[in-house]
Image: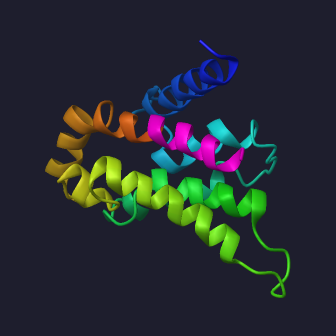
Amino acid sequence: MSPQAQQVQELQEKVVRYFCNRPSNFPIGRPYNCCESVLLTLSQPLGINSDLIPKIGTAIGAGVSLNGLLCGSISSVVMLIGAKYGRTSADQNPQPIWQMADEYIAAFREKFGAVNCRQLTGLNLKTEEGLKQYFARVHDYECTERLKFAVEKALEILQK
């Protein structure tokens, strides 16, 4: 296995740990959500050091606060693209950053068939039953595959 492939695998294992390790006061306390997990996993290898990580991702998980909107595995990668390459003035051209985000979103949609959490999970996480089903059959399984993809594809795009 190449050193790059080994790094990807180690980071994929790390993102799954962040996402799946339930705190002792679960379900009141929750594992890190998808957005927080990706931000925590990739910020250091990408040279992004900020006290805002993982805080900026807390309200983003599960399609923005359980609303089933854009998957946090997408939101987090887009945030990382912006943190690493985003503009520092309005005079700068945003097009290269948009292209990186578009590349990631297109690859995600191609692999998983959708970009919104509710479409990906098939569940309404705002309901007690939906959240119960999510933790029973989706969280540790389908969502971890999306997180592993996020890590691998984000590194590919951001380390070009």
- Residue bounds of the magenta highlight: 148-160
Residue 156 counted in the magenta span: yes
* Residue 14 occupies quadrant: top right
Left or right: 25, with 103 as reference point: left
Q: Residue furthest top?
A: 1
- Residue plotted at (64% across, 16% down): 2
Vertical comparison of 134 with 99: above or below: above
| Residue 137 in the image, given as x and y percentages of width and height | 20, 34
- Residue plotted at (81% across, 87% down): 90
- Residue plotted at (17% across, 53% down): 122
Vertical comparison of 105 with 143: above or below: below
* Residue 10 occupies quadrant: top right
* Residue 88 occupies quadrant: bottom right
- Magenta region, main secondary structure: helix
Left or right: 124, with 153 as reference point: left
Residue 27 visible in the current orientation = no
60, 14: nearer the viewer: 14
Q: Residue furthest left?
A: 129
- Residue plotted at (59% across, 46% down): 154
98, 134: nearer the viewer: 98
Vertical comparison of 77 with 19: above or below: below
Vertical comparison of 107 with 38: above or below: below
| Residue 117 in the image, given as x and y percentages of width and height | 31, 57
Q: Residue furthest bottom?
A: 91
Residue 129 counted in the magenta span: no
Residue 118 visible in the current orientation = yes
Q: Which of the image's four quarters has the N terminus?
A: top right
| Residue 114 in the image, given as x and y percentages of width and height | 29, 59
